[in-house]
Amino acid sequence: MGHRAAIVGAGHSRFGVLPEGPRALLRTALDGAAASVDHGLDRARIGRGYLATLGFGGWQLGNSSALLAEELGVPGLATLRVENACASGGFALQEAVRAVASGAVDLVAVAGLEKMTDVSAARRRYWLGVSGDTEWERQAGLTFAGVYGLIASEYLAAHPEAAEALAAVAVKNHANGALNPNAHFRKPITREQARASPRVADPLGLYDCCPVSDGAAALLIASPEHARSFTDTPVYIDGVGAASDYLALQERPDRRGFAASRRAAAVAFQEAGVAPTEVGLAEVHDCFTIAELLALEDLGLCGRGEAAKLTLSGATERSGACPVNPDGGLKSKGHPIGASGVSQAYEVFLQLRGAAGPRQVRSARSAVTHNVGGAGATAAVAVYTAG
Ligand code: COA
């Protein structure tokens, strides 16, 4: 128990279909993080850097972490690229936490980056597909929407009432995204629109899917001992957990939840010494609306099979008892693969410092982030408290 690390600065580019290239997006996020350090940042204090990216489109597949040092303005910094598909950001954050908790370094830069919209639809399908199982899924023509469609079908067969909850998740996250100046979509929608949207992979429609987005986010992670030399209001990371599962869906005995999420959550909450139901805010991996329902259950925010009830009760809305995805989530804020896990921690940093503006939730003092790779093959969870 106790604090393992602290977020002392955070930055974010816009997410969406953007004209900027990867370097400019990365620089925006890093400069934002540096500027947010209340007592000023001496960049020479940064001892290590992690860049989370799938390298989508192959823009700089090899050695891309060197760009982090370049755009940070700390040439020579020891850097490492972290790639665990959509969970790259969450895993990069965990590496940063372990690095400062080990005493090896006092301050670490973590950035997540993806440039997804400058490739053709065919290449986009390929680059998303490489994060699923190649032999049984991608080469058989299954997309991620297809995989999550299969998961949703199985879930809805067991819990037919969840169909309405999928629409409620889309409406909630679009309403939240409308208040987020960095969000890909800033467009509230109704349940009727969600239900009537064109089918992408039945039972999932357009409003059940995250979009394809460009964007970057960055964090400065300090050891707890040094945190207050950077800011009077750090956000502490008290527990982290990570796990994996079979890559292909067919190998898993249970497809109505992600075992990797459950394992990662158990470790993170145990390390933090808090119960899941005690946290006041959750940022979960809602790449498809069904994924938000699975996340509520896998994190232990409710029991198995109870996510629809919790969602339809309004508890996960911004004004509810446990707001979920107040930034709009992947659904509305957007999902630039490597950036998403870092962006979740950025939102926690704002919310727990009371600096989230119009989308600020009431008085949360603790939070959890949940970042999933592909369709649950990897998962990273972190638990936070306000300083
Ligand atoms: N939600 C809401 N609106 C969306 C959207 C989404 N996910 N994706 C696109 N749109 C909107 C666009 O803004 C555009 O609106 P406009 O006509 O008013 O400008 C319209 O739909 C068409 O956009 P387009 O880019 O041509 O859509 P598309 O059919 O090529 O792609 C999806 C739609 C759902 C297939 C695509 O967003 C997708 O593949 N999402 C999932 C990405 C993914 O798998 N990520 C990894 C998760 S594990």
Image: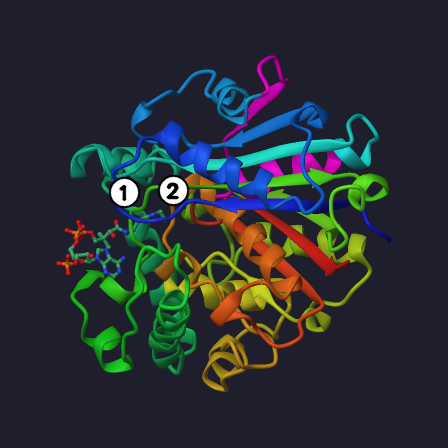
User: In the displayed structure, would residue 186 be above or below residue 168?
Assistant: above
The residue singled out by tag 2 in the image is 215
User: In the displayed structure, would residue 33 be above or below residue 196?
Assistant: above
Say which residue appears at 65% left-offset and 27% top-offset: 43
Question: How far across and down, in percent of the image, does residue 367 sit?
Answer: 66, 63
Residue type beneath disc 2: Gly
Say which residue appears at 54% left-offset and 26% top-offset: 72
Q: Is residue 196 left or right of residue 145?
A: left
Asked whether 363 or 127 is in front, the reply is 363
Element at label 1: loop
Asked whether 279 or 153 is in front, the reply is 279
**Quarter of image, res 304:** bottom right
Say which residue appears at 57% left-offset and 15% top-offset: 75
The residue singled out by tag 1 in the image is 18
**Quarter of image, res 136:** top left
**Quarter of image, res 116:** top left
Can residue 202 be seen at all in this image of the molecule? no
Residue type beneath disc 1: Leu
Asked whether 212 or 67 is in front, the reply is 67
In the displayed orientation, state which residue is furthest to the top. 76
Q: Is residue 260 left or right of residue 29?
A: right
Which region shows up in magenta?
74-98
Q: Quadrant of ligand 1?
A: bottom left
User: In the displayed structure, would residue 279 be above or below residue 149?
Assistant: below
Cα distance, mark 1 to mark 2? Answer: 8 Å
Question: How far across and down, in percent of the image, does residue 48 sit?
Answer: 67, 25
Say which residue appears at 82% left-offset and 44% top-offset: 224
User: In the displayed structure, would residue 310 be above or below residue 45?
Assistant: below
Magenta-span inclusion, residue 167: no
Callout 1–callout 2 Cβ contact below 8 Å: yes
